[in-house]
Amino acid sequence: MALLVASRSPVAQGQVTASIYGHIREGRYDDAIHILEWELQNFPTSRAALSLMAYALFQAEDFAAAAALYEQLIRLYPEVTDYKQYQAHALYKAGLHQDAAKLAVGLESQEQSLTLQIAIKYEQNDIAGCKRLLEKLPAGNSDATVGAACLMYKEANYDDARKLFTTALNTSGYQPELAYNIALCYYQVKQYGPALKHIAEIIERGVTEHPELSVGAAEDGAGVLKESALVEAFNLKGAIEYNMKNCEAAREAMADAPPRTEEELDPVTLHNSALFSMDVDPTGGFRKLSHLLQAPPFPPPTFCNLLMLYCKPQHAFYDLAADIMAENSDLVATSLSKEAHEFLEAAMLSTSAPDEAFQRFDVLAARHADALRQLTKKVQGARLARDTEALKHAVIAYEEALEAYIPVLMGQARIYWDMEHFSRVQTILQQSVDFCSEHEAWKLNCAHTFFMQGDGRFKEAISFYEPLVQGHLENLLEVTAIVLANLCVCYIMTSQNDQAEALMRQVERQEEQQASADPNKRSFHFCIVNLVIGTLYCVKGNYEFGIARIIKSMEPESKKLEADTWFYAKRCFLALLEGVAKHMITLKDSSYEELASFLDAVERHGTGIQSSVVGDQQQTAAEEARLLRKTLLRLRQ
């Protein structure tokens, strides 16, 4: 280990010991290491300095460096047998399991030796070896109880694992780590209520016992995080919200955790923050996941999640996914299940070889359908037998199988969607109605499919869109804006204009309420609804009403004018100007004045909005608005 060279002591003479212990007591291990580096230059064989340095490095999670120092201490002070235990533990934490196992076997304390060997075999997924060693621990040993619980968890026996963790908690007194393990067991069986209850207790105790961690603050904080289990608790809380489709709440959970810079984040937190932010910051999410992949160790799902996200239709980075799989053949073998591998291969072929991709998806879909039929029988059998426990497990298994089936089904449908063969998409979706009729993604895609088929299918689209919206009438801003826009279009196309107006008024009112409560929070729901409706009227030839709607959608320009909103608005303006130039459209003077006034406002507010690239130069919304206004005035003359 290389030591930094300092010209003089970083603390005053006589204050060294007090400063080192003070930093360690307050969890400022980097500061303690800085002082100890200087001390070791002057006293390279000092037992106190070496021992404290090794401890500080271990607590700072530089386990390899800590193990090297403990090895040095063993050579210098062989009579202190505790250093062997500390070195073995550091090697284990550094992932050097074989070296740690050799040392663990020779430890004087049989109990400590067995405990460490069990932990090593657990990390190596040697379940049989763990069980053999657990039997050698004394009866009633708390480590044996926790070890047995961990094994049950690894074998997916979550209920029995939770019971053993609870026993250990009751026996040894409250420990945040054990409470977290109990919450994790509840999470795995989707009992989110009890899981959140334990998480809330961990957070409450952490805030009370460690106020220096600044939980919920947006400023730097310091302190010992391990013993509080706060990081783990906030990660689990975020995971629960994410599973419940509350991405914003998941991000808030991560923001409430003890503040750390991105460089200080542990791999699990970095992975989760990337996953929870993909809907608002996909670039940042991909960057974080790619960084994790290049800097092992990383959470096991990282590789699969990155590939799945690359292959989502809204990203469609199929070539990138293929390159990553080719570069990481070892991870393909160890981190991807057979189902995930086959799904990814089918998805990557969907643009280059759609026929082959469809066939692969079809094979996968048939397999999933068979599994769902078997699970349906299990659910029905458990209900008939009135076996509550079996029913609970069967329902969870069915829900998990359905979640695995939905992406395969949508992958199939997407191939024909991209071909604009919407009747074929409808046929594919209808084939799965027995399994998916209550799944929100299935209902949403059915609605979109009927909507895209146009005249004659709008009423059917309404029958799918309405339930999705009705369930969120108190908070319509939680509904995707395009769903609200499409439903309004369906109402208009079926002569239900009053329904469309009522829905739009509700959206507008809720946006105003949100803006009043949080002026910095921006919402584009009402803007998008009006943009879509305005575009619809323009397509139908009613430019006066359509353009008026589009202008209304952009009010106030200071908040609603963005590159995306301007892109869709200017398309309608260009179509209008083309029609006027060809003498196909006649506008009232009031419409000319309204549009000219709006373009003038865009020119004022759009100076910093990059909207297009002309040659080698970027053009702003303001520059485009000036050109459109100039053309409009010329045509009016």
Image (cartoon, grey):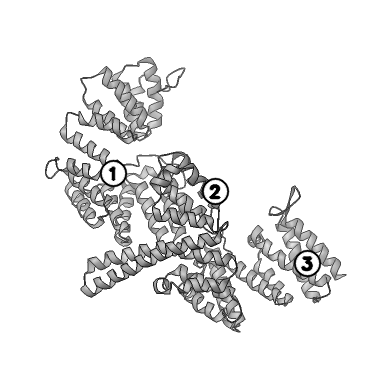
Name of the residue lying farthest toward the left: 139
Residue ID at (58%, 70%): 421
Picture quarter with the C terminus = bottom right
Q: Above or below — where is 37 with respect to 596?
A: above
Q: Percent x, y for residue 601? A: 73, 62
Find residue 320 and name its label: 2
Question: Would you say residue 215 is visible in this rendering?
Answer: no
Name of the residue lying farthest toward the right: 637
Q: Tag 1: residue type?
A: Asn
Left or right, residue 267 beside residue 608: left
Q: In this rendering, which labeled residue sits more in front, label 1 or label 3?
A: 1
Q: Please identify the quarter of the rendering in which residue 609 is found.
A: bottom right
Find residue 221 and name its label: none
Nearest to N terminus: mark 2 or mark 1:
1
Residue ID at (65%, 62%): 565
Q: Tag 2: residue type?
A: Leu
Q: Percent x, y for residue 5? A: 45, 19
Q: Nearer the viewer, residue 468 or 526?
A: 468
Nearest to N terminus: mark 1 or mark 3:
1
Q: Which residue is mark 1?
A: 125
Residue ID at (49%, 66%): 478
Q: Please identify the quarter of the rendering in which residue 526 is found.
A: bottom right
Which element carries disc 3, helix, strand or loop?
A: helix
Left or right, residue 633 beside residue 453: right
Nearest to N terminus: mark 2 or mark 3:
2
Specify few, some or many for label 3: CA neighbours under 10 Å numbering under 14, 14-19, or 20 or more.
Answer: some
Specify few, some or many for label 2: CA neighbours under 10 Å numbering under 14, 14-19, or 20 or more.
Answer: some
| CA gap, disc 2 and disc 1 | 31 Å
Q: Which residue is mark 3?
A: 596
